[in-house]
Image (cartoon, rainbow, N blue to C red):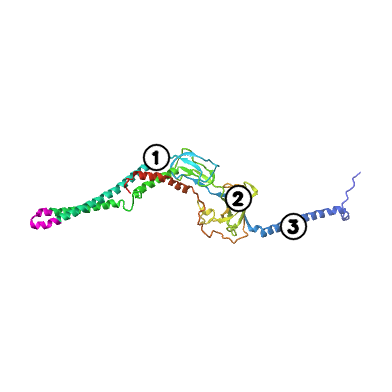
Amino acid sequence: MSAPAEKTPTTDDKDKVPQNQKAKPSTSTHKRNLWMAGLAVLFLLIGIAWLLYWLLVGRFYVYTEDAYVHGNQVMLTPQVTAGVKAIFADETDLVQQGQLVVELDSSNFLIRIEELKKNLANQVRDVSYLFRDAQAKLALVKVREAELRQAELDLCHRKPLVQTGAVSREEFETFETIVVVTKENLVYAEKEYGAALSLIQGTDIETHPRVQQAVWELRQAYLDLIRCQIWSPVTGYIAKRSVQVGDQVAVGQTLLYIVPLDYIWVNANYKETQLSHVRIGQPVTFTADLYGKGVEYHGQVIGLQPGSGNAFSLLPPENASGNWIKIIQRVPVRISVDPQEIKKNPLVLGLSMRVSVDVHDVSGPKLAEQPTLMPIYTTPIYTTQVDDLFEFDPIIRELIDKNIYPKDS
């Protein structure tokens, strides 16, 4: 028995397909269209929201992550050449302004002071001799004047006696010669007195240049002795200590760095296209990678560097060539940091920062318009060293008094 033949579906059979099966393709397409429309509306709303945010908020802020903490790095250097005797602070230690950090060997300076004390004593004695010598030569001038006056009187008395023969012509000529010689002796004595006077004129023993030179050499030696103790010029933290005990250090050699973290700033490297509205005094907010976004710092724009980073590089770019490609340059913007916020959450040099400048107010200048007339940084330690010289004055006074002849003035 043969199998029944398959019936080919006709048009009428197709029309008899159930309604639920016919609606399936239409429902799927409808849902897909709804999803696409919804996504389009969502993206449109996001775009509108972003546009509104940019128009109302975003365009008034310029943001960069190319920003780093900067601060002063005070180099501690000796002012005299000597060996290192002791070191009183190491890296990461806090030192106060005026605190002793490094002590140098002072043996050579103590010997030098003793030598210069003897030199001052000798100079006082030598200058005392100059005053005595001038006084002696002045007395000699007076003696020569008296001799000349006596010789002229003797000649005057014998002149009329020549006519009477009481005095011979030869004797009279002898007295004439005595007058001439006495005059020349007086001239010579006056010149010697003038030469001696020129060495002391307008001074006394204490103010004589030779004595003053010896005094200042002694003061300099005492100042060098004081400078064997090297004090911290600022309050800060020790970094990069390279000096070791026993080193022979020279004037100006860097021993270590002191970083005062109570005053630091941020250099934000903005693209040149972002700087059109940046002005001095604008408020700034920033965060550090060290603490995350939960800790926010505040400050303001101090100023713009007068050149891009490439302008101050070791090898500035030379664009006067045929193969030129435009590269957007970055200009460092210096930003202050609130000192109270630094005390609460300390920052160290070189940290990365996220910086946002509020450019609502563009009334400020782009570059500084007035020069700074007062010192930005000062330290009193060098003034203190000079003041310490007055402690040496009694020793100098005693040396001078001891070597001046009692009757000298």
Q: Which residue is mark 1?
A: 111
User: Viewer-proximal residue, 288 or 120?
Assistant: 120
Can see residue 118? yes
Q: Amino acid at mark 2?
A: Gln
Instruction: Give percent across and percent down for residue 163.
Output: 9, 58
Q: Amino acid at mark 1?
A: Ile
User: Viewer-proximal residue, 115 or 204?
Assistant: 204
As for residue 159 lying within the magenta part, the answer is yes
Residue depicted at x 71% and y 59%: 48
Q: Image height check: is 107 above or below 216?
A: above
As for residue 32 lying within the magenta part, the answer is no
Q: Among all residues in the image, which is located at the extreme right?
A: 1
Could you tell me which secondary element the residue under label 2 belongs to?
Answer: helix
Q: Amino acid at mark 3?
A: Val
The residues tagged by marks 2 and 3 sit, at their Cα atoms, a distance apart of 48 Å
- Residue 209: assigned label: none
Instruction: Give percent across and percent down for residue 384.
Output: 47, 47
Q: Which residue is mark 3?
A: 41
Q: Which residue is mark 2?
A: 340
Can see residue 220? no
Q: First in sequence: mark 2 or mark 3?
A: 3
Residue depicted at x 35% and y 50%: 209
Instruction: Give percent across and percent down for residue 193.
Output: 26, 52
Give the residues in magenta. Answer: 156-173
Q: First in sequence: mark 1 or mark 3?
A: 3
**Along the horizontal axis of the image, is 185 left or right of 80?**
left
Q: First in sequence: mark 2 or mark 1?
A: 1
**Along the horizontal axis of the image, is 36 left or right of 185?**
right
Q: Image height check: is 302 above or below 291?
A: below
